[in-house]
Image (spheres, grey):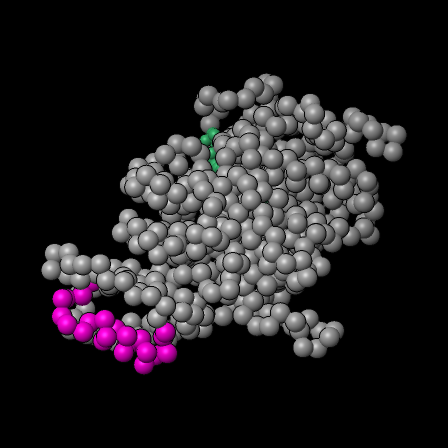
């Protein structure tokens, strides 16, 4: 059971719990953007929830003791011995805000082995090692909380675990990476270059230490895997999540999209590919899901089109609730710290009620993650979506007709075709399709590439399916 329970370690008593006085000792791993925000929030408690008075920053683990810090901590708190924090008998809640896979993963596992509750902002570790982490945590009777891992400060993990739990989730469509949304927003608004805007995002503390994870859609892939797992009640194998980033999004495509009434966003999508109502009334059938991340043209009227800059938004379509959208700051020190400290508070609240006081007590089912089975993920070739494609063609007569014939023979119906004149002896043709099976669309493209009139196909982007969240 949890560290106050079935635990050989003594508990220091400060505040009041059934007549006794208690403080919950927090061991913080990392004092970067999120760690610093967390300390600042814990040091500035006036006007916030009274339970925060009972949280104590006991140790803070960092890589370098010489680095200037934006927060003042009493002598002896800062250490480079992170191992000592996760095994310290005094520490009840370990907060991992180091980032990266190692040593974050090993330290989380060690903390669990020492019966510590864990709060983490690390979606990369949870998406890859969630299975072993939650198996170990459930066996040890401790919580692993991760509100900050998706949508930064936006409450979305707890709502999925709790308030939305009675709904059948049809789809989750989110802008869950602040860095790429910031880059796309500025590229669209100012025509700025990708590299300049990325450098600004790094300076502002939004980007991961290695921004490849942001730019190539992997960070968003980790996050949608976590959201899908909670929404559909099963584990997700990360390699099943299709991830495409924003490197290939050009100013040309941004301009065409705008003319056609769209805006381009990096969307993370998890949706049921099978009917949402199980046929047998009692047995819940495992749904077939599509879980993916890609730049997407969305109508300018769509609720996600107006999410700009580092803001994130997660649109949930559920039965019987309907549509609900979570919106807010998806990264940054204060916002992310809000999620971290709310998780600490949730754990402290459970400990304070004495819920885990006995060896036989089980974890609170709306706070713990206990899925065992894997969700089935449909291959991308089976996805039904719309496409935007830009072709550079030789200025031969009848090119548009030939494109139409190839598409038509694979069942691809075109919603619009735009030709905008000749550049360097090549004509530029942009098509937007109706809903089509992705495999059929690619077969048509393979045939089109063989046409003598086709010079190249510089862009292929998905367009939000007809009827999705509009
Ligand atoms: N930044 C954001 O807006 C958000 C971040 N997150 C997640 O939060 C986590 C932390 O991110 P962030 O605060 O930006 O990261 P930073 O790079 O700003 O901070 C990392 C901290 O961890 C310490 N650290 C890293 N590796 C080690 C190590 N091997 N040994 C000891 N200390 C180490 C660093 O020590 P030192 O200071 O000595 O270098 C630093 O204090 C990540 O998982 C990230 O994905 C989630 C949501 C938003
Ligand atoms: N790098 C991430 C930070 C939060 O998770 C982002 O840009 O969203
Ligand atoms: Na969140």
Question: Among all residues in the image, which is located at the extreme left?
Answer: 425
Q: Viewed as shown, does residue 281 lie left or right of 465?
A: right
* 445 magenta-colored: no
- What residue is drawn where x is 81% and y is 50%? 361
Residue drawn at point x = 59 percent, y = 59 percent = 317
Q: Quadrant of residue 78?
A: top right
Examine the rendering and report whether any part of residue 355 can be seen. Answer: yes
Q: Residue at x 58, y 47 (%)?
A: 326
User: Can the viewer see residue 448?
Assistant: no
Closest to the observer: 349 or 23?
349
Span highlighted in magenta in the image: 392-413
Coordinates of residue 119 in the picture (x, y in percent): 62, 41
| Coordinates of residue 112 in the picture (x, y in percent) | 65, 46
Location of residue 441 (image quadrant): bottom left
Q: Identify the residue at image location x=41%, y=45%.
A: 180
Q: Position of residue 390 (x, y in %)?
A: 27, 61
The image shows residue 270 at horizontal and vertical percentages of 53, 60
Using residue 249 as the reference point, say whether residue 22 is left or right of it: right
Task: Reply yes or no: does residue 401 show up in magenta.
Answer: yes
Q: Residue furthest bottom?
A: 409
């Amino acid at each position: 059971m949890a560290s106050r329970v079935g635990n050989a370690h003594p508990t220091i008593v400060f505040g009041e719990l059934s007549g006794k006085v208690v403080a919950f000792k927090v061991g913080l791993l990392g004092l970067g953007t999120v760690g610093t925000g967390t300390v600042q929030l814990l040091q500035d408690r006036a006007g916030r929830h009274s339970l925060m008075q009972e949280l104590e920053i006991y140790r803070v683990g960092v890589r370098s003791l010489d680095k200037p810090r934006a927060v003042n901590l009493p002598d002896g708190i800062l250490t480079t011995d992170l191992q000592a924090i996760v095994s310290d008998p005094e520490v009840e809640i370990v907060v991992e805000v180091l980032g990266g896979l190692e040593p974050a993963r090993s330290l989380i596992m060690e903390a669990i082995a020492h019966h510590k509750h864990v709060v983490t902002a690390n979606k990369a570790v949870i998406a890859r090692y969630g299975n072993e982490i939650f198996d170990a945590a459930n066996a040890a009777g401790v919580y692993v909380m991760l509100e900050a891992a998706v949508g930064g400060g936006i409450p979305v993990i707890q709502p999925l675990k709790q308030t939305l739990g009675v709904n059948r989730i049809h789809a989750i469509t989110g802008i869950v990476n602040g860095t790429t949304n910031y880059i796309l927003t500025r590229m669209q608004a100012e025509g700025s270059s990708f590299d300049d805007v990325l450098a600004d995002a790094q300076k502002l503390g939004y980007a991961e230490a290695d921004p490849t994870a942001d730019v190539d859609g992997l960070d968003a892939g980790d996050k949608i895997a976590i959201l899908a797992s909670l929404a559909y009640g099963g584990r997700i194998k990360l390699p099943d999540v299709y991830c495409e980033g924003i490197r290939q999004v050009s100013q040309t495509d941004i301009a065409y999209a705008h003319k056609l009434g769209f805006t381009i966003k990096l969307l993370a999508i998890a949706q049921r590919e099978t009917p949402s109502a199980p046929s047998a009334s009692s047995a819940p059938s495992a749904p077939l899901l599509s879980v993916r991340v890609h730049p997407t043209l969305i109508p300018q009227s769509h609720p996600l089109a107006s999410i700009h800059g580092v803001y994130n938004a997660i649109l949930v379509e559920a039965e019987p609730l309907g549509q609900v959208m979570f919106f807010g700051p998806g990264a940054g020190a204060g916002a992310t710290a809000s999620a971290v400290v709310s998780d600490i508070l949730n754990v402290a609240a459970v400990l304070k009620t004495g819920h885990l006081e006995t060896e036989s007590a089980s974890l609170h089912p709306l706070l713990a993650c206990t899925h065992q089975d894997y969700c089935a993920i449909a291959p991308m070739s089976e996805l039904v979506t719309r496409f935007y494609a830009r072709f550079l063609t030789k200025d031969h007569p009848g090119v548009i007709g030939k494109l139409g014939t190839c598409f038509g023979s694979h069942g691809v119906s075109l919603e619009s075709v735009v030709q905008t004149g000749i550049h360097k002896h090549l004509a530029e043709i942009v098509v937007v399709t109706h809903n089509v099976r992705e495999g059929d669309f690619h077969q048509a493209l393979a045939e089109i590439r063989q046409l003598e009139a086709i010079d190249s196909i510089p862009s292929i982007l998905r367009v939000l399916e007809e009827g999705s969240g509009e």
